[in-house]
Image: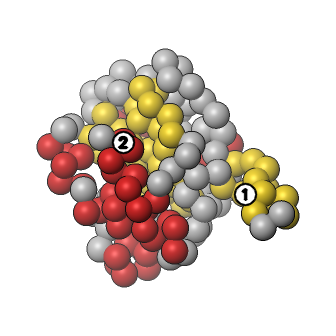
C-alpha cells in the first residue's frame, strides 16, 4: 500500500461517459480516490451510497470524490444511475490504475486465495501528495473514516 507523504502516482483513465480523467485534473483540489471491487455488490453499494450521502460535506471541505474499479463504463453508468451517485467512476479494465495504487493483489475470502481489487482509499492533497491511506474500509461508515 502507498503511504502518507508519498507523491500520488499519475493516472489517466476513462469515466462512465468515456471522458478522460487524470490526476492533473485535480491539481489545487483535495481528492478522495477510492478503489472498490465491483459495482452493485452489497459492500461496494454501501460504500458508494455512504460517500453519496456525505458528498455535500466533502465538497464543502474542498474535496472531490472519484471511484475506480475494473468494471466497464457501461456497468459504471448503471451503478451511478441506480444509486444516483454524484461523482464519477473510472473504468480501469486493464488494471493500470489499480496496480499503480497498489489496490490490486492477493486476497483471501472464505479460505480461498485469489487476485482482485483491494478495497483501498487514498486522500490526496492539492499538491498531489497522499495525506491519508485507508486499507481497512468500513463500507457503511467510510465518510466518517475519511473526514
Q: CA distance from mark 1 to mark 2?
A: 23 Å
Cβ atoms at labels 1 and 2 below 8 Å apart: no
Looking at the picture, tell me which residue is in the foreground, 98 or 113.
Answer: 113
Q: Quadrant of residue 146?
A: top left
- Classify the position of the C terminus by image quarter: top left
Frontmost of labels 1 and 2 is 2
Q: Quadrant of residue 62?
A: top left
Looking at the picture, tell me which residue is in the foreground, 147 or 62.
Answer: 147
Name the mark on residue 27.
none
Q: Residue at x 43, y 75 (%)?
A: 79
Where disc 2 sits, the SS reads: helix
> Which residue, given by chain and number where applicable, does mark 2 sit on?
146
**Furthest-left residue in this view:** 60
Q: Residue at x 47, y 54 (%)?
A: 138
> Which residue, given by chain and number where applicable, does mark 1 sit on?
116
Q: Seen in the image, is 27 located left or right of residue 131?
A: left
Disc 1 or 2, which lies upstream in sequence? Answer: 1
| Crowdedness near tag 2: few (<14), some (14–19) or many (≥20) residues, C-alpha within 10 Å | some
Where disc 1 sits, the SS reads: strand
Relative vertical location of residue 138 with respect to residue 10 in this rendering, above or below = below
- Look at the image and tell me whether residue 120 can be seen: no
Amino acid at each position: 500500500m502507498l503511504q502518507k507523504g508519498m507523491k500520488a502516482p499519475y493516472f489517466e483513465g476513462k469515466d462512465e461517459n468515456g471522458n478522460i480523467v487524470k490526476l492533473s485534473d485535480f491539481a489545487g483540489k483535495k481528492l478522495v480516490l477510492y478503489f472498490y471491487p465491483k459495482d452493485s455488490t452489497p459492500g461496494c453499494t454501501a460504500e458508494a451510497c455512504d460517500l453519496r450521502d456525505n458528498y455535500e460535506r466533502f465538497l464543502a471541505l474542498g474535496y472531490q470524490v472519484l471511484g475506480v474499479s475494473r468494471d466497464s463504463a457501461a456497468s459504471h453508468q448503471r451503478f451511478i444511475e441506480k444509486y444516483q451517485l454524484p461523482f464519477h467512476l473510472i473504468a480501469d479494465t486493464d488494471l493500470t490504475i489499480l496496480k499503480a495504487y497498489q489496490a490490486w493483489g492477493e486476497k483471501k475470502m472464505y479460505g480461498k486465495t485469489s487476485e482482485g481489487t483491494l478495497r483501498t482509499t487514498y486522500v490526496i492533497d492539492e499538491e498531489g501528495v497522499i495525506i491519508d491511506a485507508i486499507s481497512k474500509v468500513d463500507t457503511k461508515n467510510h465518510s466518517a473514516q475519511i473526514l
